[in-house]
Amino acid sequence: MTNPLTKADIVARYLPTTLSHATSATAFAPSNIALCKYWGKRDAELNLPINASLSISLGNLGTSTTLSSAENGIDSLSLNGKKLSKDNPFYQKVFAFIDLFRRKQHLPICIATTNTIPTAAGLASSASGFAALTLAIDKFFNLNLPLSTLSAFARMGSGSASRSLYTGFVEWHKGTQDDGMDSYAEAIDSTWQDFRIGIVQVSSEEKKINSRQGMNRTVNTSMLYSQWQRQAEHDLEAIRNAIIHKDFTRLGETAEHNALSMHATMISAFPPVLYWQPESVAVMHKVWQLRDNGTPAYLTMDAGPNVKLLFLQQNTAAITKNFTPLKIIAPFANAK
Ligand code: PMV
């Protein structure tokens, strides 16, 4: 059954009758990598997840977005300094999101968005993109809404964007309400200075099956899907506890198991959803070999062929020796 509630109906409840706006507003949001993954929607319109998830934000790697009122009266959008045309799918997605707030009012807007994620890193920018856009909208239209509400709005743009409003470790509650307003993310109050993420880039090619299609197919055809839901629930609890007790082994083992179980579920869909390339598998074996030789390193993977490593600062030398080039992220570098 489709949800009779639309995004527009839900957002409208939080808006004043007449919108005021600033001349311009800028916001930054970090990209994030899930340690306990989100895979499967219970509502496709609102991007409501079947399971809760938990991520780590990537410090200053993310998206910065500025909204300003368009002097010439025409909407425009630039991405990394390049102007996009009106028929570009990204342009359409962004302005459909803006229209949830601006509604029928004549408020031409100029949007400039820049990714600080190197394109070569093969990291998704939709999470940080929709999170930065939502934060900039809140400032531009003087909404002053709580972060939990903004997180639920960002989720309507891209599910994992709900987690990109915060730094550090973040948990996205799945929620149970039909309007999804209890499906938002919150920061976990815990820093881990030594925690490191390494990105092993296998390919920068565009994926053939996007996450929306991949999730749909998995939910509809994989016999393993019900098992995935149970495991995700269990893993989230274990990872949250590992963060609180700074138990790296438990965190790494659970995150790796979670990612590989998600991929096993995808592979068991039909037609199969397989994001791995032969090089991805080679990297996995290298991680396991390193671990057998005494270096605690774990891996996680998303809807693409690149492998993300989880390790602690003291093992940086051993890791970089084995994986080059490696983009290393210290997610708590700016935390007190
Ligand atoms: O938010 P989406 O539609 O890009 O989906 C994200 C899916 C994964 O990256 C595989 C998992 C996650 O929780 O980020």
Image (tube, rainbow, N blue to C red):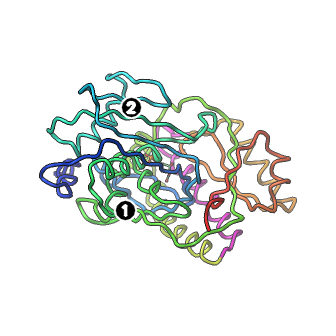
**Which residue, given by chain and number where applicable, does mark 1 sit on?**
147
**Residue beneath the point at 51% across and 65% down:** 231
The stretch of residues the image draws in magenta is 246-274
Ligand 1 neighbours mark 2 (CB distance < 8 Å): no
Of helix, strand and loop, which one carries label 1? helix
What crowding class fits label 2: few (fewer than 14 Cα within 10 Å), some (14-19), or many (20 or more)? some
Chief secondary structure of the magenta portion: helix
Ligand 1 neighbours mark 1 (CB distance < 8 Å): no
Q: Is residue 117 above or below residue 197?
A: above
Amino acid at dot 1: Leu
| N-terminal label among 2 and 1 | 2
Q: Is residue 210 above or below residue 294?
A: above
**Residue beneath the point at 48% across and 68% down:** 233
**Which residue, given by chain and number where applicable, does mark 2 sit on?**
90
In the displayed structure, does residue 99 sit left or right of residue 279? left
**Residue beneath the point at 46% across and 31% down:** 79
Amino acid at dot 2: Phe
* Structural distance between the alpha carbons of marks 2 and 1: 25 Å
